[in-house]
Amino acid sequence: MNKVSQEIMGLLGISLGLDQAYFKDFFEQNDSILRLNHYPPCQKPELTLGTGPHTDPTSLTILHQDQVGGLQVFADEKWHSVAHIPGAFVVNIGDTFMALTNGIYKSCLHRAVVNTETVRKSLAFFLCPKLERRVTPAAGLVNAANSRKYPDFTWAALLEFTQNHYRADMKTLVAFSKWVQEQESNNKLIP
Ligand code: OGA
Ligand code: NI
């Protein structure tokens, strides 16, 4: 998974006019996460969601969903079901990559629905930077037409924010940016 995600990072770098090695180097050492999601069947699936609408705070997600299906992405003002394709992974951009590209790549809003019949499982690999590495956009991606969108941060800080202060939703990065700026101004007040 690590290798696949690095190859994708190489291509994403090229797509932005950066060197193929740019993001590969950035993520060469990484503190990535592997998570198994288990969604039990639900008698009233219309009343709940397996996972509410959110963007992943991480950088890149490579997800394997089983044949039950249930992943949905929000595009063109509608929720679209992502069909299970045997042998295929679902790849999506997360908030940290959105910050690394100064908002050029957008993190993808998604959710998972449950059903009355069957357990559903999915396996997600989340590519994350090394915990203490500074997340800052590539110089060429900040310019007069695309001014600086988010403050510098570390993955350790965003992880702490989403685990202890804020439940990931569709505006995590905006809420986090505000929190970072508040923390910085509080620190300045301490002599
Ligand atoms: C997640 C997620 C979706 C799924 O783990 O962040 O969005 O289909 N999972 O399980
Ligand atoms: Ni997710």
Image (cartoon, grey):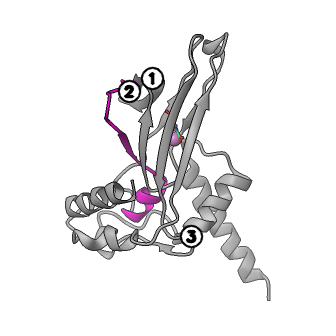
Q: Residue 149 vs residue 48: left or right?
A: left
Residue at the spot 56% in from the left edge and 70% down from the top edge: 131
Residue 69 got which mark?
Answer: 1
- Ligand 1 is within 8 Å of the C-beta of the residue at disc 1: no
Q: Distance between the residues labelled 2 and 3?
A: 31 Å
The correct choice, above or below, for 12 with respect to 92 in the image is below
Residue 82 got which mark?
Answer: 2
> Looking at this rendering, what residue extends furthest in the bottom direction?
191
Report helix, strand or loop for mark 3.
loop
> Looking at this rendering, what residue extends furthest in the front direction?
87
Q: Can residue 143 be seen in this view?
A: no
Residue extent of the magenta highlight = 81-101
- Looking at the image, do the residues carrying marks 1 and 2 touch, with CB atoms under 8 Å apart? yes
Precedes in sequence: disc 3 or disc 1: 1
Q: Which amino acid does label 1 sit on?
A: Gly
Residue 142 place in picture, x, y as percent: 34, 70
Q: Which quarter of the figure has residue 11?
A: bottom left
Residue at the spot 46% in from the left edge and 20% down from the top edge: 68
Residue at the spot 57% in from the left edge and 20% down from the top edge: 114
Q: Which amino acid does label 2 sit on?
A: Val
Q: Between 49 and 65, which is closer to the camera in this rendering? A: 65
Q: How crowded is mark 3: few (under 14 residues within 10 Å), some or many (20 or more)?
A: some
- Ligand 1 is within 8 Å of the C-beta of the residue at disc 2: yes
Residue 22 got which mark?
Answer: none
Residue 110 magenta-highlighted: no
Comparing labels 1 and 2, the label whose residue is closer to the camera = 1
Report helix, strand or loop for mark 2.
loop
Residue underneath mark 3: 131
Q: Residues within 10 Å of mark 1 (few under 14, many from 20)?
A: some
